[in-house]
Image (spheres, rainbow, N blue to C red):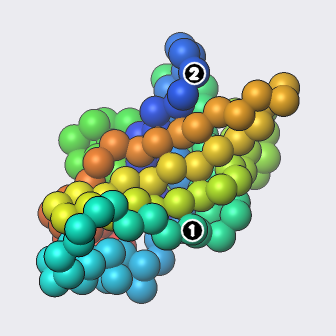
Amino acid sequence: MTVAIEAIPSEDTEAFTYLAFEYDNDLFTDVYENLTQIKKEKILTFNLDSNFFTIISGSYHTLRKRLSIPNIEKDKFSVKDIELKHTPNVYPLEYCQLHIENNYFYFTAYTFKAKKKVEFQSVNFDRAFIENLQKKCN
């Protein structure tokens, strides 16, 4: 199952941008445990596999065929079987990371467009996000 979440790019764009990744129950179980049982002094950062995320970018009428934008606006995610073939508006990202603080977590990833580094950052998520995601995917 593919999960899509909102991504905020480090450069101005009119396109909608979303991070897409294959759901990993073990990863989200570990993040949930980290949020609920481990006190942290500072933000923890974990490297994920390179190309863990795929960016989906484009106009609303292009993206609505691939994912549910209303679900992302309501639940902070969309779960679908999305075909992530590489087209002009779908491409893999590098340097994918997970960042965990005491009550929330978020993701970052980078791409290099025309020799320029662009960072994509997700919105912040909490344990309720994980609970809702696990209900939909399990």
Q: Which mark is residue 96?
A: none
In the image, 135: left or right of 92? Answer: left
Q: Residue furthest right?
A: 114
Mark 2 surroundings within 10 Å by alpha-carbon count, few (fewer than 14), some (14 through 19), many (20 or more): few
Q: Secondary structure at mark 2?
A: loop
Most extreme residue toward the front is 41
Residue at 71% in and 41% down = 111
The amino acid on which the numbered mark 2 sits, given as a three-letter code, is Glu
Comparing 20 with 106, the one in front is: 106
Residue 11 numbered mark, or none:
2
Relative to 33, is 57 above or below?
A: above
| Residue visible at 54% across and 28% down in the picture | 10
Query: Is residue 138 in view from this perspective?
Result: no
Per the image, the residue denoted by label 1 is 47
- Alpha carbon separation for disc pair 2 and 1: 23 Å
Percent of width and height locating residue 24: 47, 77
How dense is the environment of label 1, judged by Cα within 10 Å: few (below 14), some, or many (20 and up)?
Answer: some
What residue is rendered at 53% in x and 30% in y? 9
Which residue shows up at 53% across the image and 60% down it? Answer: 97
Query: Residue 135 vs residue 99: left or right?
Result: left
Of label 2 and label 1, which has the lower sequence position? 2
